Amino acid sequence: ISSSPQRLSASFAITWPPGQVNQKVVRLRGIYFKGTYINQYYHTATDRLVDESTSDELTLSMPLNLGDDFENGNVITVHGILDRTLTNKGLIQIVLKVT
């Protein structure tokens, strides 16, 4: 099959459209690490939640005021809705939008 990165990305976007992937609220527990990216427009921070027993991690998008309550390296439990982003460089990222 012959294709291009743009066509592949577009195909993926149709199969798994942007927006919330799972409309149900999920609860996740892991080790919290504060990120460096802050979105001033949406007042959110992009942080990480690392599995307690493996190196697997998930990106957290959370309101700035919630992140103030967490310290790096602490085990936390968060609730949110799963979402995904797809960049023009082909990166697919699963994100938990913390509520």
Image (cartoon, rainbow, N blue to C red):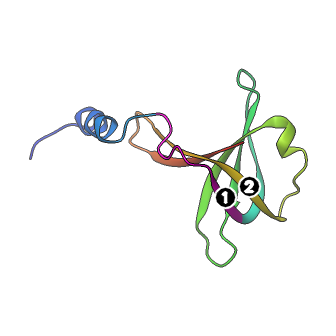
Amino acid bearing label 2: Val
Residue 87 position within the rendered picture, expressed as x and y whole percent measured from the top left = 44, 36
Q: Quadrant of residue 91?
A: top left
Determine which residue is flagged by label 2: 78
Tag of residue 27: 1
Residue depicted at x 72% and y 66% = 30
Q: Decide whether residue 81 is among the magenta residues.
A: no
Amino acid bearing label 1: Arg
C-beta proximity under 8 Å, tags 1 and 2? yes
Residue depicted at x 70% and y 52% = 79
Chief SS of the magenta region: loop
Q: Quadrant of residue 61?
A: top right
Mark 1 surroundings: few (<14), some (14-19) or many (≥20) residues within 10 A: few
Q: Is residue 86 left or right of residue 23?
A: left
Number of numbered discs visible in the structure rendering? 2
Q: Is residue 42 left or right of residue 88?
A: right
Q: CA distance from mark 1 to mark 2?
A: 6 Å
Residue 82 position within the rendered picture, expressed as x and y whole percent measured from the top left = 55, 47
Residue 11 position within the rendered picture, expressed as x and y whole percent measured from the top left = 25, 37
The mark that comes first in sequence, 1 or 2, is 1
Helix, strand or loop for disc 2: strand
Farthest residue, direction left: 1
Mark 2 surroundings: few (<14), some (14-19) or many (≥20) residues within 10 A: some
Q: Is residue 7 left or right of residue 63?
A: left
